[in-house]
Amino acid sequence: MNSFNGHILEVETVGNLSLVRVALGKNTQWVSVVLDTPQTAPYLVPGEDIRVLFKETEVILNLQDPNLLSVDNYLKGTVKEVEAGEILSRLVLDTEIGELVAVVGSKSLKRLGLARNMSVLAMVKMNELILAP
Amino acid sequence: MIEINLTKKLRSTGGSMLLDLELKIKKGEFVSLYGVSGAGKTCTLRVLSGLLTPDKGRIVVNGTTWFDAGKKINLSPQQRKIGYVFQDYALFPNMTVRQNLEFALQKGQSKSIVDNLVAIVELGDFLNRKPSTLSGGQQQRVALARALVQRPEILILDEPLSALDHKMRSKLQEYILKVHNAFNLTTILVSHNIGEIVKLSNHIYELHNGRVVREGKALDFFNAERNSAKFRFTGEVIHIEKEEVIYVVSVLVGNSVVKVVTDREEALALTLGDQVFVASKAFNPILERI
Amino acid sequence: MDWQPLVLTFKLAFVTTIILLVIAVPIANWLSSTHSKMKPVVETLVSMPLVLPPTVLGFYMLVAFSPANFFGNWLNEWLGIRLIFSFEGLVVASIIYSLPFMVQPLQAGLASISPTLKEAAYTMGKSKRTTLFRILLPNIKSSILTGIVLTFAHTVGEFGVVLMIGGNMPGKTKVASIAIYDEVEALNYAAANNYSMILFAITFAILLLVYLINGGYLKRYSR
C-alpha cells in the first residue's frame, strides 16, 4: 500500500459524497471522492493533516499527455528499480513526495519500454484514494 | 442511572491488580466493556451484581445505595435486581428448560412472563429438554430468557456469544437488542468482538489493568482505525504467499476466507494469526444477486 | 446361627448413615465454598479417622464418654444418656469414625459444580438454602450415593472403635465384626465363616450396585 502524508485544501460536498482536494507536495494536488461528509467524518476540513492511501496495483503508468485520460491524479517520477515477473512487474518510482510503488502488467512494461532512470507519469483514479486521519 | 465508584484489590495468577472504577451508566443505555483478558471486565460485572465485595467506595443504582463501604451497606446478590448471563450460561443441568426458567420466578410472580420470554427467544420446541441436549445457541437463548424472568432493570452479559459461530452470533445479537428494547433494560456487555460491540452498544468503556482508560460513543470509539474505506471487516491472517512480485494474504473474515494482494513490505510486516482490517473503498466491490 | 449380630450391624449402619447425611451436607457445603483460614484445620479433623488406628479413636471416646469424666458425667446426669457400652454410644462413635467417608465425596461433588450455577441462583434472588437443595444437591446425586454407600459399608466393617466403646454385649453392642472375632476365638470357624460370607456378599453387592449406577450401566440397559 502506498501511503503519503498531506493536508486537506478543500472539501466539496454534494449529498453524501465529498470531493476532497489534498496537497501532497509542492506540485502535487490530488483529489479523492469519498462516501463521507464533514458531518460523518469530522476530519474532512481544510487544513487538517491527512494520509492518502492507495494500492500499488491501482497505479497507472503513462508516457503521454495525462489530460487525454479520465484519470484525475498524476505525478511525475523517475524509475528507480524494476522487478520484472512473467505476468506482473513491480516498479519503484522516485517522486517529489517520496518513493511510490507501482505494480503493472509485464506486457505493458515491455510495450512502454520502461527501464531504470526513465521519466514516467504515475496516475491514480480519484475513487481509489483512501483518506485516513 | 448506575453510579459506580469503588476500588477492589484483586489477586490473580499474574499477581495482584487494583480495580479502580468510576462509571456512570445512564438508564436504558447499552454499554460495552472492552479490553484485553484480565483487564477487570468480569470483575466489574461481579462487583455490580454483588458476587464480589469491593474494598472501598459506593454503588448507587437509580438513587438506591447498593454498596457503601463507609456506611457498611452491602446488598446481597439476591437483593439486587440484576439479570446475569454467565459466559458458561450456568444452566441448571438437573432441570428442563421450562424448569430452569420457572426456577427464576419470584415469590408470587405470574408464570405468564415465562411464556412471554419463550415466545420472544423462540424456545417453544425445547421446553422439556435438558440443557445438555441443546446446542450452544439454544443454551444461550435459555440463559438470556432465564436472566429476564425476574424482570430485572439491569441485564449483564459476560461474553455471552464467545462460544458461538458467526451465524449464530448475529442471530443472538438480534435477540439481545430485541429484549434490551422490549424490557427497557440497562444492559452491560463484556465482549472482545469489535463488530459485536459496535453493533449492540451506545457507549463503550475500555478497561486496562483495572481502570477505564478510554470511553466513548460506539461509533467514535474505534476511530483510530477509521478511514474513508467503507467496505471493511476485521479478520485474522491465516496464510501469506508470494506470487511473482506481489504477495497474497489470506484472511479469515467471519467464516469465509478472503484473499488480499499486498506489496512486499506489508506482507513481511504481517504474521499468521494477526488481527487485521480488510478495507476497500465503497467504489470497488461489485454486487451480484445470488 | 444367631442373626442378632447381623441385624444389629445393619441397624447401626443405617442409623449412622442417615444421621451422617444430615450432618455432612452442611459441613461439605461449607468446606467446598469457604476461604476461611479454619478450612485446613476442619478438613484435617474430618479426615483424621482415615489414618488414625480405630483403637486410638475408641480409646479417647471411651475416656470422654465415661461417667467418671466431666463430659460423660454431664451426659449421664443431664440427658440420661450413657454412651459407653450402649447402642447410642456405637452410633456416636460410628458417626465420628465414618465422617470422612460421607463428607469427602459430598465435598468433592460440590466443588466440581461450576460456581456460576450457585451465583446464577443468587442473582435470581434465591437463598443459599434454596440453592443448596434445588440446585447443588440434585446435581451431585452420584456423590451423595457414593457417600451413603461408603459410609454404610464402612460402618458395617467397623471393629476397633466398636469393641472399645461398645464392648461385646449380645443384642446391644455385639455387631457382626465382633461376633466373627468371638467365634474365631472360640475356634468355631464354621460360624465365623457364615458371618463373614454374609458380610462379604452384602458389601460386594452394595458396592457393585453403586459402580453400576454411577457408571451409568443401568441407565444404558433401561433405555
Image (cartoon, coloured by chain):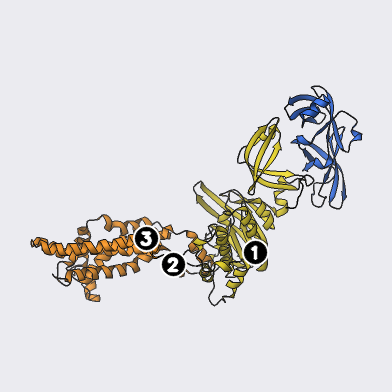
User: Toward which corner of the image does residue C168 lie, by quadrant?
Assistant: bottom left
Percent x, y for residue C29? 40, 63
Evaluate whether residue A102 shows in this view: no
Q: Colour of chain C?
A: orange
Foreground: disc 3 or disc 1? 3
Image position of C115 (left or right of A72): left
Q: Chain B is drawn in which colour?
A: yellow
**Dot 3 or dot 2, earlier in sequence:** 2
Mark 3: few/some/many CA within 10 Å (<14, 14-19, 20+)? few
Which residue is more in the foreground, C223 or C73?
A: C223
Q: In which quarter of the image is the N terminus of chain C?
A: bottom left
Which residue is more in the foreground, B9 or A57?
A: A57
Identify which residue is drawn at 65% across, 54% down. B196
Residue extending farthest to the left is C187
Percent x, y for residue B10? 52, 52
Identify which residue is drawn at 65% across, 42% down. B251
Mark 3 residue type = Tyr
Q: Colour of chain A?
A: blue
Q: Distance between the residues labelled 3 and 2?
A: 28 Å
Identify which residue is drawn at 16% across, 72% down. C171
Q: Which element type, helix, strand or loop, lies under badge 3?
A: helix
Q: Distance between the residues labelled 3 and 1?
A: 48 Å
User: Would you name the residue on which mark 2 appears?
Assistant: C132
Labelled disc at residue B186: 1
Mark 1 residue type = Thr
Labelled disc at residue C217: 3
User: Toward which corner of the image does residue C37 lie, by quadrant?
Assistant: bottom left
Labelled disc at residue B171: none
Mark 2 residue type = Leu
Percent x, y for residue C85? 17, 69
